[in-house]
Amino acid sequence: MRNRVIAVLAALPIVLGGAPAIAAPTAQDETRYVALGDSYAAGNAAGAYDTTSGACRRSTRAYPALWAAQHAVSDFRFAACSGATTADVLRQQLPALSRNTTLVTLTIGGNDLEFSDSTTSCLLPTSTDAACDRALDESERLLREELPQKLQETHQAIEKAAPNAKVVVTGYPHLLETGSQSCTVGTPARRMRFNSLTDETNELTRELAEKQGFLFADVRDPFDSHGICTTTGRQEWITRLTLPTWASFHPTATGHAQGYLPPVTAAING
């Protein structure tokens, strides 16, 4: 009995004081975590790439690696890869899952909609309104006709491969701010339509994730006013056209730390 009383008293300051913003890793919190997805999960443009990941360009500053570093993760498998589609997740990344997996994060869908073609057609200095409209029309068609089934199949496969895992699906940020008339990255109308496509993608992803019983992390609010062409004086958390080109139009290291990580953490804790 005396030992029980001591244990209860020892726990009281923690209970009354509340949990810290970033808890120190403890053995009791051990997690077997697998991160799936595309370049937004891998961390293109965040720097500090794992040299063993090759063309996947997995960054130690990407939100999955940041979350794993802040928690007692007994097994972290970073399977996300630059350029991945839902088909790539099913073929190449799913084997990282098992019945022992306790946490999965997933960022996917942009490449299925050919986002890279849309950015090239809409946001480069040489792009035209006609080319942008054609690219976004095709992305919207893919969103309506193909992406729902692809996401559903991916979600079902994840649940089957990791039936004991909590699964958090993330959305995408707005890459662009629409208020500036002087910004040379696309026109205000093109930026607005591109963001609209992002919103439709996020809402579809949220709907299908929650239908599967997964959690959804919406990253749009923390990225608000930090997109390309911001007029608020805030830092842009999305890279503009840069070299190497694969880093263009992706979240920076700050975007991962302050834009992606907080909503992902909140979803996991929730």
Image (tube, rainbow, N blue to C red):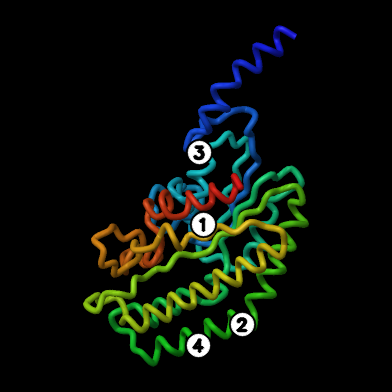
Marks 3 and 4 sit apart, C-alpha to C-alpha, by 41 Å
Q: Are there few (<14), some (14-19), or many (20+) residues within 10 Å of tag 1? A: many
Amino acid found under the numbered disc labelled 4? Asp
Mark 2 or 3: in front is 2
Marks 1 and 3 sit apart, C-alpha to C-alpha, by 15 Å
Q: Which mark is residue 104?
A: none
Spot occupied by residue 71 in the image (x, y as percentages of width and height): 55, 36
Q: Which residue is mark 1?
A: 41
Amino acid found under the numbered disc labelled 1? Ala
Amino acid found under the numbered disc labelled 2? Arg
Q: Which mark is residue 69?
A: 3
- Say which element carries label 4: helix
Seen from the viewer's position, the closer of residues 209 and 97 is 209
Q: Which residue is mark 2?
A: 144
Q: Earlier in the sequence, mark 3 or mark 4?
A: 3
Image quarter in which the N terminus is found: top right
Amino acid found under the numbered disc labelled 3? Ala
Q: Is residue 7 left or right of residue 262?
A: right
- Say which element carries label 3: helix
Which residue occupies 37% across, 51% down?
Answer: 254
Q: Which residue is mark 4?
A: 137
Which residue occupies 40% across, 60% down?
Answer: 223
Marks 2 and 3 sit apart, C-alpha to C-alpha, by 38 Å
Q: Are there few (<14), some (14-19), or many (20+) residues within 10 Å of tag 4? A: some
Q: Are there few (<14), some (14-19), or many (20+) residues within 10 Å of tag 2? A: some
- Say which element carries label 1: helix
